[in-house]
Image (tube, grey):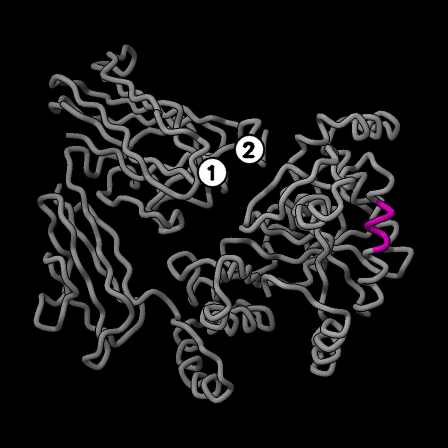
């Protein structure tokens, strides 16, 4: 539950209720990062000692607990003593994730701690911090759980790792003999929308990586689905958790061999009356409509897919919600020019889900797959190597599947355009600095006849401040006299690190790009 607080009486009531039903409530007390609320109340726990405001939205902030201050550990041990008294279970989660080191780098107390303890850097300082807390919890008969960042700098004895940045952290921990909880964002973050993680994707999850040995697999205790409520008002929590939690439950209590989603899907339908009787405001299994583009015989097609069986889908090119009197989607829609397609699903002649507006941009480079100078992120593929010329632009939801992302690296793309006339190139980029996503410093376009020597076409400088808040999209377009060439190069300069003023100063930045539009 986001906001407010729990009294000791509240906590005891929750724990007793859960225990009576065989559920163990594990508290998470964040350290050393995600601690601005405590630092706002007790500034002396930070490296600067300066007063600051409590944050009112999600973020990663550079003010974290001072690791060089003995009073920090006195405070945290007092807090943990109270937590231990309230939660009788074996496990205490201490977070350990998303802790920028910029304050520690500038703090004389932290630097002295590094020197006195014989540590090499701030990552080892975080490991030392976690080890101190682990020793204290162990002395109280508790086992520490931390997010996979606690692996950095060395893992504390007895610590359990919860892997959220993919499965790699969990694999590393299991291989070193530590117990693991798998919670990769790819399958387990239920605050994400259905376009990222739907019922079928959750059902496809298996928490035990195949590359582990039989003995190492025993360290994978299971998985956890996460519902971060700052991303969803309380009235949406039920619809985000259900029915996806049904899939996660079955994934964790059954073997992956012989698992059949269609059979599971039919059983879920029979479960809905029970959920309704229990007052659960469950949501959809998937987005009713998904879409993609394909290039067949040089022609661009928009392909509309049904998210669930027994749907009829209609579309229109008018700016209005389609009705059953509009064109029914039977096959791919040929796209010969830029336009917007309005699509609506129907079930039993009633609209099902929200209408979807699909903007398709037709241009000369459609279907040309570029060579990449750096790999795009596994988490934000945009659909893979065809993403840059599939005609689909990204939206303000950077998880919509149309954005391709690069962390730290510059973007360099080379398209084999085979002598076509080119007079403009345009790319869109995304900024949301709270999530370390920034516009490029600049974008350059150049053309070559031989793939070796490039002629400069244009450079578009970023004129928007990286301090501009909120999520927004900006176009980097260069127009020039018509040129011919065989190879078109697009280069976008990544900031690489969050600047000093940023709460995550020094952390690697992201570039998000959606389409390279050639005319």
Please identify the dominant SS of the magenta region: helix
Q: Is residue 174 visible?
A: no
Q: Is residue 500 visible?
A: yes
Does dot 1 land on a helix, a strand or a loop? Answer: helix
Residue at 67 percent of width and 38 percent of height: 63
- Vertical order, 484 against 293 (above or below): above
| Quarter in which the C terminus is drawn | top left
Give 288 or 479, whichever is nearer the viewer.
479
Distance from disc 1 to disc 2, alpha carbons, whole Å, reads: 8 Å
List x then y, in percent, for residue 253.
60, 73
Does dot 2 land on a helix, a strand or a loop? Answer: loop
Residue under numbered circle 1: 433
Give 481 or 253, whichever is nearer the viewer.
481
The quadrant holding residue 288 is bottom left
Picture disc at residue 167: none
The quadrant holding residue 374 is top left
- Per the rendered image, the range of residues in magenta is 73-78
Residue at 20 percent of width and 14 percent of height: 449
Who comes first in sequence, dot 1 or dot 2?
1
Picture disc at residue 502: 2
Question: Are dots 1 and 2 in contact, CB under 8 Å?
Answer: yes
């Amino acid at each position: 539950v986001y906001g407010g607080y729990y009294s000791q009486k509240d906590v005891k009531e929750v724990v007793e209720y859960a225990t009576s039903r065989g559920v163990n409530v594990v508290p998470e007390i964040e350290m050393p990062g995600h601690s601005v609320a405590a630092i706002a109340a007790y500034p002396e726990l930070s490296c600067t000692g300066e007063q600051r405001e409590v944050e009112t939205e999600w973020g990663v902030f550079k003010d974290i607990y001072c690791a060089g201050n003995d009073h920090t550990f006195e405070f945290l041990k007092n807090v943990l003593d109270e937590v231990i008294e309230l939660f009788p279970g074996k496990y205490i989660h201490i977070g350990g994730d998303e802790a920028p080191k910029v304050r520690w780098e500038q703090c004389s107390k932290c630097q002295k701690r590094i020197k006195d303890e014989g540590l090499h850097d701030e990552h080892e300082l975080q490991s030392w911090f976690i080890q101190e807390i682990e020793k204290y919890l162990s002395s109280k008969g508790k086992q520490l759980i931390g997010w996979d960042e606690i692996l950095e700098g060395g893992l504390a004895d007895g610590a359990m790792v919860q892997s959220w940045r993919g499965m790699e952290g969990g694999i590393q921990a299991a291989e070193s003999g530590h117990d693991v909880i798998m919670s990769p964002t790819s399958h387990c973050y239920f605050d994400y929308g259905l376009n990222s993680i739907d019922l079928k994707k959750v059902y496809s999850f298996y928490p035990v990586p195949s590359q582990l040995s039989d003995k190492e697999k025993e360290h994978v205790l299971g998985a956890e689905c996460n519902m971060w409520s700052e991303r969803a008002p309380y009235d949406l929590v039920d619809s985000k958790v259900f029915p996806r939690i049904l899939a996660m439950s079955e994934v964790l209590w059954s073997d992956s061999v012989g698992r059949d989603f269609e059979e599971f899907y039919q059983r879920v339908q029979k479960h809905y009356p029970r959920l309704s009787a229990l007052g659960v405001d469950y949501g959809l299994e998937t987005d009713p409509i998904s879409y993609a583009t394909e290039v067949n015989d040089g022609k661009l097609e928009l392909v509309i897919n049904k998210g669930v069986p027994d749907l009829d889908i209609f579309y229109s090119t008018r700016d209005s919600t389609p009705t059953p009197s509009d064109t029914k989607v039977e096959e791919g829609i040929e796209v010969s020019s830029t336009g917007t397609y309005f699509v609506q699903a129907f079930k039993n002649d009633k609209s099902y889900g929200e209408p979807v507006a699909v903007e398709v941009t037709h241009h000369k480079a459609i279907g040309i797959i570029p060579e990449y100078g750096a790999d795009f992120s596994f988490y934000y593929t945009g659909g893979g190597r065809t993403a840059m010329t599939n005609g689909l632009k990204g939206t303000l939801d950077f998880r919509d599947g149309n954005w391709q992302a690069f962390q730290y690296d510059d973007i360099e793309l080379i398209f084999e355009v085979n002598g076509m006339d080119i007079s403009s190139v345009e790319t869109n980029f995304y900024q949301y600095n709270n999530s370390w996503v920034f516009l490029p410093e600049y974008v350059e376009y150049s053309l070559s006849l031989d793939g070796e020597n490039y002629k400069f076409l244009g450079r578009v400088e970023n004129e928007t401040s990286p301090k501009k808040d909120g999520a927004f999209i900006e176009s980097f377009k260069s127009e020039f006299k018509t040129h011919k060439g065989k190879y078109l190069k697009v280069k976008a300069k990544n900031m690489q690190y969050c600047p000093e003023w940023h709460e995550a100063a020094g952390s690697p930045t992201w570039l998000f790009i959606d389409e390279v539009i050639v005319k």
